[in-house]
Structure formats: structure tokens, C-alpha cells
Image (cartoon, rainbow, N blue to C red):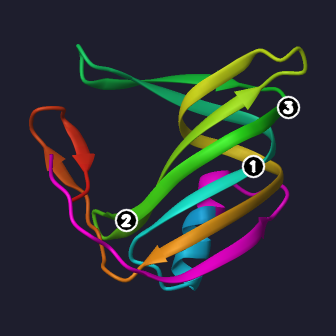
Amino acid sequence: MDYREVDSSAEYVARLETGADWRGEIESLAAEADADAGWFTALGAVSDAEIWFYDQDTKEYEPVEFDEPLEVASCVGNVSWLDGDRFAHTHAVLSRPDGETLAGHLNSATVFAGEVHLRVFEEPLERTHDETTDLDLWL
């Protein structure tokens, strides 16, 4: 396990713009807050979503698209640098009207309504390629 202590420098709350991309809005908040790293939680609703599932055998993401309104019951993630850009690594639990849940790496979604809390770390974090998992991980 790799780890290090981080200090928080600021916290922000924001309302996501209806019709915008969910992850893009979080990345925009991080840019406006000049956050090089942080942790966020969010909730709300989306008009559609694309969730990625990482196949550990093939080491590839498999996209699953949902063209329907969904509740964002929980959304967590972190902000760091990836290939020179701020990247919001976003996971979400989404639900349908009947209570069925869908979960995974949230690649994209169209915001219907969303609220986010971002805690900014003082130290920047950058993702680098991990050969074992074939993923871009921080630290």
C-alpha cells in the first residue's frame, strides 16, 4: 500500500448546471477552485448516463449506456491530474423508479439536478500508469 498524509486547504459546495455533463461540471469546479487534488461527494439526478465496468481479465473498460432518467443516490470520487488535465475519477450508484440500482465508474451523464461537495487537498496528486492493473492511479 502506498499512502501519504494530505491537508485540506478549502471546501466548496456547488450546484451543477442542468444539461451539462456531470463529470465535466466537477472538473470545471476543480479548475475554478484551482484544485490540484481533492475528494468529492455528490447527489442528484441525471437524464442519461454511461457507466464503465473494468474487466480485470482483459484490462479494458466496458461501457454500458442508459438513455433514461436516473436518480444519483450516491456519487464519490477524487480529483487529480491525468495527462496534464484535471480529472474527476467518478463512481456513482444510480437508481431507477422501481428502486433497481446501477453502479460503476461514471464516464458521462447529463445533469438534471446535482449538488456537490469538494474538499481540496493542499498537495497536488497526479495519476501515473500502473503496470499491474493497467490503470492510471494516483500516488
Residue drawn at x 61%, y 38% is: 92
31 sits to left or right of 87: right
- Which residue is tagged 1? 43
Sequence-first tag of 2 and 3: 3
Q: Are marks 3 and 1 in contact (CB under 8 Å)?
A: no
* Residue 69 marker: 3
Instruction: Kindly state the secondary structure of the residue where label 2 is placed.
Output: strand
Could you tell me the amino acid type at mark 2?
Answer: Ser
Bounds of the magenta segment: 1-25
As helix, strand or loop, the secondary structure at mark 3 comes to loop
Quarter occupied by the C terminus? bottom left
Looking at the rendered structure, which numbered label has been put on residue 22?
none
Q: Nearer the viewer, residue 13 or 31?
A: 13
Q: Is residue 12 magenta?
A: yes
Front one among 34 and 11 = 11
Vertical arrangement, residue 64 with respect to residue 91, above or below: above
Say which amino acid is labelled 3: Pro
Task: Report x, y in % for residue 73.
Answer: 75, 37
In the image, residue 127 lies in the stretch drawn in magenta: no
> Whole-percent x and y of residue 123?
31, 80
> For the residues marked 2 and 3, what is the alpha-carbon distance in whole angstroms?
29 Å
Q: Which residue is mark 2?
A: 80
Which picture quadrant has residue 119?
bottom right
